[in-house]
Structures are given as structure tokens and as C-alpha cells.
Image (cartoon, rainbow, N blue to C red):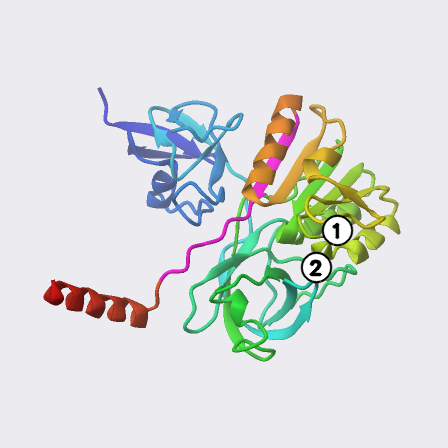
Amino acid sequence: MSSTAHISINGRTVATRIGATLLDAALAARIPMPHDCCTGQCDTCRVTAPSGVDDNGTRVRDTVLGCQATITGPAAITFEEVPAVVALAGVIFAIRPLSPSIVEVVIETDAPLRYLPGQYVKLGFKGLPERDYSPTLGLGGEADENRLYFHIRRYPGGRLSGALGSTIREGARLKVRGPFGHAWLRQGSGPLVLVASGTGFAPIWSIAVAARLGQPDRPLTMIAGARDPLDLYMRHAFAWLAARGVRDLTLTCSGAPAFADIRAGRPTDALPPLDPSATVHVAGAPAMTAAVAALAQEAGAQCVADPFTIKPTAPTWRERILGGVRLLQNGRGA
């Protein structure tokens, strides 16, 4: 039995080892397949591969994750071309409160960043670990090719989010690397249902603006939810959509009592009837995105999910050294 197979990657035939991941096969052939985490979490490397692969539990219809699926025989692999990953220098132009726990951070870059609505980038400040955030537009639809808008929740003890407005202020310099991700807006004609919780609204808002401007005849529904009604900072954005003919706009709150314009419950409670003609984009808390994805699958609708997870904060080199000293001290004392 041969240990190699000939596969086609975006029309280019290459020989690769049986058992190699699709991503490794592409990179060995110097074919730039999009990827980021390489652990099956980010979905950046999702490609179309109907047969000839072991999907290792990652299959969604005809697609698999290139970093996890392995070659079993001849296969035809295709993926959509996306903007190349670049690293840009940037500076914080503004930090503005959106709610008691969420801020809008506006970053000016030294060159325009090409990204697709719904993708994410990595922000890196000196001395801090990189963090993933989704660039979006101003809540009034403001756009500037050298400005990126981010919605960032402050977490207690958050090394980056907790420093915003204190040690990280306007004028602070940083690196922007990207874009990454697979949850971008595609062309289509069927109903577009956009669902967000919390700061998941950032990529969903980017998608909404792009859809309204680029696909104006496409029916659009927008649902944004939060546990705390004070975190529903989206009203200005909803007004922008309403002024452009969007009528299916719903704010939901699952925690404190709702205001008059807020529907009590979760975003899933506000979902319209779905059918196979619909495309659902959902971003935010993992449990919410999973629930929406399950409802979409049950209805036969296409769903593009972008779950927001909190990345564990790795210790700094100083903390690692001090931790090692403590371990040594503990060992000697024992």
C-alpha cells in the first residue's frame, strides 16, 4: 500500500504523505492555507474536502479543519482566498466607554489592514500577551481605512483589558497582526440572521454594515443580547440599520429586568423561523453560539459561529522565575 497520495489543493496537484494534516500538506507545498491556532479552536483553516480525508470529528457538511483532518487518499481540497496575514504598527487613538464594563478602543494603523467582515486580529502591547479581538466600525457606521474599532470587555485581573485607560492610554503603541478567522460574510441572496451577545456584537456589526451596503436587497434580521441591560450599547448601530430599511431589530436581556425597548430572555428566544434558505452568523458566549448553531442545524440553515472564549493569561517571565524560586524553596524546606 502506498504511503503517499496525490491531492489537489485549489487546483494544484501535490504529492503528500498519507496521514499528514491538510494544513501540513499545503504548507509543505508552499500553498498559503489560512491558519492560526493549529489546535482546532479558531476555525481559520476550515476548507472544503468532500472525500479522501479523515475529518477527525471536524466535518461540517463538505468542510473540515485543515489542521486536524488528515489525508487518507486522493482528495480535492479547496478554500476561499482571504487577505494575507500582515503585521502592522498602530497607536491607540481613543478609548471610550460603551457601558460600565465595555469600552470602544480605536486604533490607527500605519497602513490600511485588509480584512473581511467577521474576521479577527491579534493585538500585542509590549510586555503583554497577544489577545484576539474583532475589528469593526464605529457604531454610527464610521469607517476609515487606517482606523480599526474594537469592543473590549474589562475583566477583573485582565492583563490587557484591565490596563485600558490606566497603564494603556491614548497614544500607546502596539502591534496589530492578522486577519484570521473563517466567520466572514459571504455573498448570498437568502435571509441573513445576525445574532450577538456581549462584545460578540463587534464582528456582527461589521457583517451587518457590509451586508446592508453590499447586499442591500438581502433580508436582514439582527438580534443582540446581554445579561445586564446596561451592556446593550448597540442602540446607535440599530438606528443606523433602521434608517436603511432594516425592521427586524431586537435587543434581549437575560438578567436584570428589561427596559421598554428590550425583550426579556436570551437571543435564542428571539430567533425568527429558520429554513434552509437562511444564513445565520452568531458571535459571543460559547453556550449561546452553540445553542443558535443547533437551532440552525435543526432547520437546515447554514450557520457560521464565532464563539468568544477567555484566553488564559500565561505568566510573565518574572512570574515564572519567582514561581521557580518558590518551588525550590518549598523543596528545600520539605
Of the pair 17 and 69, the residue shown nearer to us: 69
Q: In this rendering, is residue 53 above or below 83?
A: above
Q: Position of residue 98 (x, y in %)?
A: 70, 63
What's the residue at 60%, 58% (across, down)?
114
Q: What quarter of the picture does the C terminus occupy?
A: bottom left
Q: Hey, which residue is sitting farthest top in the picture?
A: 1
* Residue at position x 31%, y 27% in the image: 5
Residue range of the region highlighted in magenta in the rendering: 301-314
- Contact between labelled residues 1 and 2, with CB atoms less than 8 Å apart: yes
Instruction: Check disc 1 and report the residue beneath it.
Output: 209
SS at mark 1 in the image: helix
Queried whether the magenta region covers residue 219, the answer comes back as no
Judging depth in this view, the residue of 115 and 305 nearest the camera is 305
Q: Which residue is mark 2?
A: 137
Residue at 51% x, 72% y is: 174
State how far apart marks 2 and 1 are (Cα): 8 Å
Q: Position of residue 294 (x, y in %)?
A: 59, 28
The part of the image, by quadrant, that contains residue 303 is top right
Amino acid on which the number 2 mark rests in the picture? Leu
